[in-house]
Amino acid sequence: MPLVLSASAARTLMVAAQGLDRRREGAACKADVLQTIRRMGVLQIDTIHVVARAPYFALWSRLGAYEPRWLEELEAEGALFEYWAHEACFIPIEDYPLYRHRMADTGSLGWRYSHAWMAAHREVAERVLAHIREQGPVRAADFVRQGGKGNGWWDWKPEKIALESLFAAGELMVARRERFQRVYDLRERVLPGWSDAQLPPKEETQRALALKAVRALGVAREGWVADYFRFRKGEAREAPALLAGLAAEGALRAVQVAGWDGPCYLHPDQAGLAEEAASGALVPTLTTLLTPFDPLVWDRARTRAVFGFDYTVECYVPAPKRRYGYFCLPILRRGELIGRLDAKAHRTEGRFEVKALYLEPGVATGVGAVRELPLLAVDLAQALAECAAWHGTPEVVVGPSQPLELAGLVQRAILG
């Protein structure tokens, strides 16, 4: 008899599986950073730092205050590596074999990372490799552009394209980061114990990635699994049969979720959480802010289906077409996505600015909203104060809000 979950129980399970249901007890340590990344499976990298860069922010959402340098230290120590997973990601080093097949298929990663480019510019690639072999690890900035200033990522200097292509092909790895810039080195120096004789069959890697995706998601529909680690088109087409096979052998458990179409799956490791969610015993208490690149929301279609939350990263939208602001952060409150806020950390001034604050219409106007609003404001004020303190911007200023009275309620709660 399959487990049957309500839509709200499934949502609670997904939040808990991502470690976003409650704040951990006690101060975080470096080991918690690694454990959190293992729980998510991957930690997406993005360079926008209006508030904090995506990988640091996703960790803060789960851990609260921690030392961002721990992430770089874990990479430099060899506990993490970087590669293309959902997007560019930090990945636990034990999962390196699962991505080695992708490194032989870099043509699917885009023109600037392709074997075709390296074949056409082999002399540049060989020159870059020889430089690293003889001189040691390098950054892209260590190569001087010939012919003047570039015009953006589409006008990368040849050495930068070579570094990225060699990285995608697995000939180079990121040894560490310096001021968030990648430092590249030869794979054999970063991962000296690896031999391709250890490479598992591709079928085994797809199986392992599917299991990891379902476990990280909590409960998953077929398409969500293929998206989590960005299966290639052919792999995505094969995902339904793969998942059905895993369920048939007991590696996954088939479940039913009210209102969700198609097969759904649960990892055995999450069976206890699922039972708690189904019985109502699992009650999220955490209120936090999310980066747009958090695993809970990075699949926008999944976010709409699970939370009824229509979300776009508007920093990529022309300014006149933005509805909510350049860098709006989803607000997660007690297992629900209740709104968003446009934030900016003014680090030199010690000020955390909330340019605008928006609640979802049902949150602001639903039954009991007037009574709930002060309690919501207290939760949000605590999350903002914690986020601002972690940034070293302790002064929090809240701008206009919808509903209008929310800004004042939050500001007063912050001031105590």
Image (cartoon, helix red, strand yellow):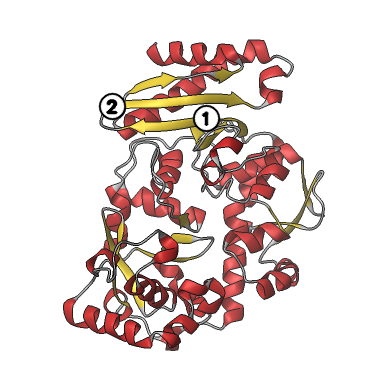
Q: Amino acid at mark 1?
A: Leu
- Residue beneath label 2, please? 350
Nearest the viewer among 337 and 107 is: 107
Quadrant (top left, top right, bottom left, bottom right) of the C terminus: top left
Residue 198 drawn at (x, y percent): 44, 84
Q: Residues within 10 Å of mark 2 (few under 14, many from 20)?
A: some
Q: Is residue 132 visible?
A: yes
Q: Amino acid at mark 2?
A: Gly
Nearest the viewer among 226 and 94 is: 226
Asked where in the image residue 190 lies, by quadrant, the reply is bottom left
Q: Residues within 10 Å of mark 1 (few under 14, many from 20)?
A: many
Asked where in the image residue 401 lies, by quadrant, the reply is top right
Q: Is residue 10 visible?
A: no
The mark nearer the N terminus, 2 or 1, is 1
Residue 335 drawn at (x, y percent): 60, 34
Quadrant (top left, top right, bottom left, bottom right) of the N terminus: bottom right
Nearest the viewer among 317 and 379 is: 317
Asked where in the image residue 313 lies, by quadrant, the reply is top right
Q: Residue furthest left?
A: 135
Disc 2 secondary structure class: loop
Real-space Cα distance between discs 2 and 1?
19 Å
Left or right placement of residue 414 versus residue 71 in this view? right
The residue under the point 45% across, 45% down is: 58
Please tell me whether residue 340 is drawn above or below residue 208 in the rendered image. Answer: above
- Residue beneath label 1, please? 341
Q: State yes or no: discs 2 and 1 in contact (Cβ < 8 Å).
A: no
Left or right placement of residue 32 versus residue 23 in this view? left
Disc 1 secondary structure class: strand
